[in-house]
Image (tube, rainbow, N blue to C red):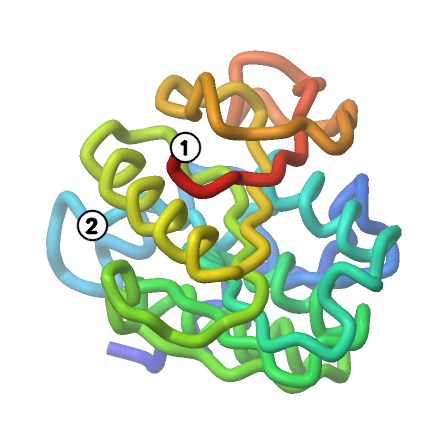
Amino acid sequence: MSAPRDFILANTALIAPPLVPEVRLHLATEVVPLWRKTEEELAQKGVPPPYWAFAWAGGQALARYVLDNPELVAGKSVLDFGSGSGLVGIAAARSGAPAVLAADIDAFAAAAIALNAKANDVDIAVTTEDVIGTTGGWQAILVGDMCYERPLAERLLAWLRERADAGALVLLGDPGRSYFPEAGVEKLATYRVQTSRDLEDREIRETGVYRLFPPS
């Protein structure tokens, strides 16, 4: 088996996401072929989809918002949770965050984040540990497109509200996933994000950026 880094370099291309043209990422153009190659590479079936190889709508919107409002993260320690390609973390680093940790439990994502950070000339730390439940100490937590599965969303949102209660700025990018919270959030911006029918059920997704508040 080749290293994740070599696999990514062989199966992706440097592409600028539509909403964030100033950032280049190692991305794939189709989901299924890359997913099959990943299963073959790992010699097992049922591996997680290659989320790291695509710039999802929630992440693009959140990255755009951070780049347009750098004062939100400038000078702060930042966690990019469920980082995937590292897009949001890269946006934070480019906006003046001196310490960015990208967290993703997928080893391929970790390799992709490192490659993408290098391609954009920023320094980002990477972890594959599950950080939910930890205290961290991050002053800002950025979460793009993570409310697609109920158990994860419920566990994640409960922890994020604890972090918000402890004083962290918690920002979410979401295009209307099934388990996004209906209360306790403030919409800050809306974007129309160009996507692909390989990834979504439409070519344009209206996507919001929200601030999450502590428990009431």
Q: Secondary structure at mark 2?
A: loop
Q: Secondary structure at mark 1?
A: loop
Measured as percent of width and height from the top left, residue 10 is found at 51, 69
Question: Disc 1 designates what residue?
Answer: 216
Look at the image and tell me whether residue 29 can be seen. no
**Residue type at tag 2:** Val
Dot 1 or dot 2, earlier in sequence: 2
For badge 1, the amino acid type reads: Ser
In the picture of the structure, the residue carrying the numbered disc 2 is 47
- Vertical placement of residue 90 versus 211, above or below: below
Establish if 79 lies above or below 115.
Answer: above
Q: Please name whichever residue, 120 or 179, is drawn nearer the observer in this view of the structure.
A: 179
Query: Residue 107, how many percent across, how many down?
Result: 32, 70
> Position of 60 compared to 47: left or right?
right
Q: Give the CA separation, mark 1 to mark 2.
A: 38 Å
Q: Which residue is nearer to you in this view: 53 or 137?
A: 137
Number of the front mark, 1 or 2: 1
Which disc, if any, is residue 121?
Answer: none
**Residue 77 occupies quadrant:** bottom right
